[in-house]
Image (cartoon, rainbow, N blue to C red):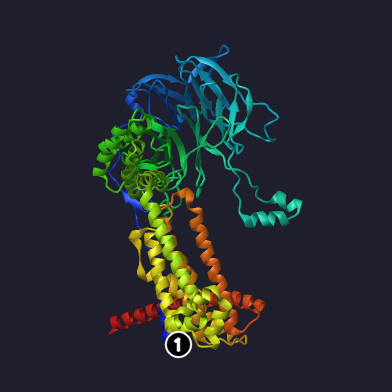
Amino acid sequence: MTRIIAALFIVTLLLGITAPVSASASDTYTYSYWGDPVPSPAPYIVDQVYYGKEWNIGALHLPQDLFVGPDDKVYIADTGNNRIIILSKQLQVINVINKFTNDGKQDELSQPEGVFADEVGHIYVADTQKRRLVEFDDKGQFVRTIGEPQSTLLRKGFQYIPTKVVVDKAKRIYVISRGSYEGVMEFDTDGLFSGFIGTNRVKFNPIDLFWKRMSTKVQREQMQQFIPLEFNNLALDKDGFIYTSTSEENSDRPLKRLNPSGVDILRSKGYFPPKGDIHTLETSSSPGSSIFIDVTSDKGGMFSALDAKRGRIFTYDKDGNLLYEFGGLGSQQGNFRTPSAIGMLDDRALVLDKDNNRLTIFEPTSYGSLIRQAVISLYTGKTDQSTTAWEKVLKLNGNFEVAYIGIGKSLLKKGENREAMSYFKSGNNREYYSEAFKRYRKMVVMDHFGSIILAVALLLGVIITVMKLSGRTEKGQYYREFGIAKNPFYTMIHPFNGFWEMKFEQKGRLKVALSIVVVFIITAIVKRQYSGFVINMNNPTELNSLNELNYIVLPFLLWCVANWSLTTLMDGEGKFKEIVMATAYALMPLIIIYIPQTLYSNIITANESSFYYLLDGLAILWFVWLLFIGTMTVHQYSASKTVITMLLTLLVSGIIIFLGVLLFSMLQQMSSFIAAVYKEISFRM
């Protein structure tokens, strides 16, 4: 039996060494709840492309910013040509601002990188090269300049290089200055600097921080400073909140939505935070996470962000759900070389490319239009229209989980809770599913209150009767009537006596222990597959029985082998068979608790999950306690020596895993070498 267990251990160890498999995404896709890229129909297609020559004003040159005003005029900061281009809604030139009269003197813009227009048509330009803001009226006539701020709030050596600007309804001016890591600069209506808002958090390497703390003052001054990352763009939505973007890789918050106090209120209730591509494709031509260069607000609480890394536009709803993605890098129409700005003109998307020197106009496809209609209808309270639109979306893309969530929200508003639960489950949204289930459960309890009380009373009666009958059975009769198989249950409650009887009175059997392991495997699989949707984060479609065996059998055998190998050198009295039985008996609390826990998980909401996780903690603590008593009894160790032995067993287990991986790698290399030699000999013969 020992040889069989050892052979099973080796096979299980080798089977557990697998290589991950990754999937590639198509050009247009979304992400599923599980993080997999899911191909989708194209939401937008190219409508028109402008290079500037079509307007008879010369070609665009390094355009850096784009803004669509409240009056649907389009403002372009044509940086390389030192001008601001103003287009009508039909994208025809209305005005070009480059030179103006300032206090009776001729003045001109110098490499402006930002432009904004308020509700009355006043135009604000971030005149970057001259380090100032310039305001024009709705006719393009000069109003004023706002120069470099002078304030004690600014750090020593601060350089004011304005690149982007927005103005809220209260006429407060918000500016991004290149190289400023303190946050967004705020100016009052008179152009006086009043402070910073929305400073990014400092990111640091814990190891670098440790060495910085250990270094001298002189050494610390020579080290790299931990400073917040600077914003690179900003946009104002209709509610007066400021969207900001940060050129930060591997961040979960590259986008923010700041209130007037500078607090980030961006909602991230989607599967993943609004950060662009989820996977960092290291093998692609543009590896790493998305780097957002611009962000713009849209109707219905939607917002879109422009990824400079791969030239993609990501659009999210107000909750942070990814609705669609389009675009890419390239020289052909619809792609970009170096995207620089994005804006929304009604339902059309406008994107600037500063290296290709062109403005690309995208129009929504029927698929994109339906998504927009569904989101905007739900946002404005038109639930029936939203549901109809989402149903049409699902006909075009049955894998779009956000559509299921959208329909579920509409049904939830109408009180159709059971139907809403089904859609929320299809969309893998546990928050809204929990709310729908809570309402549905309340309705069921009210309708069947009497039947539920009767069923609970009968169940309690059965439990009390069984406990009384069990209490009448004397200890001597206990084993005569129920036999050896009852010992694991007795050991759970009386571990010292139970493990003693198992070792010294031969009241334990290896076949019973192995049966416990098998039952535990089944129980664990049932828990994984059939726990309530609210707390079950596993993908039920990806059950791999072999993997489940590895997660249970491999650690079990690894512990037994490591413990036996170690205690042989530490004067342990336990045989390998006894170690296996003691370890298996310790699993009993997990089995006993997992079964009712799985049932309980199907009748609770997310807010009631604390007791579920409490049961998890209780089961693990009970298991560790039994394993401790079993190890101490089997080997006849003291408590302190048992603790040391268990810790060393974990260490030895790690060593065995390392040696197993090393052996597997060597066997792979040997097989590759033998195959190469055989191939070479075959060619020479």
- Residue labelled with disc 1: 2
Q: Amino acid at mark 1?
A: Thr
Residue at position x 40%, y 75% from top? 518
Q: Is residue 511 above or below residue 225?
A: below
Give coordinates of residue 206: x percent, y percent. Answer: 62, 55
Residue at position x 68%, y 27% from top? 151
Which one is nearer the viewer's eye here, 499 or 203?
499
Label 1 environment density (alpha carbons within 10 Å; few <14, some 14–19, many ≥20): few
Q: Is residue 623 left or right of residue 673?
A: right
Give coordinates of residue 655: x percent, y percent. Answer: 54, 77
Q: Which quadrant holds residue 77?
A: top left
Q: Which quadrant holds residue 155?
A: top right
Quarter containing the C terminus: bottom left
Look at the image and tell me whether residue 80 can be seen: yes
Q: Which quadrant holds residue 284?
A: bottom left
Which one is nearer the viewer's eye here, 360 or 246?
246
Q: Is residue 145 left or right of residue 444?
A: right
Q: Is residue 401 left or right of residue 554?
A: left
Q: Is residue 616 above or below residue 395?
A: below
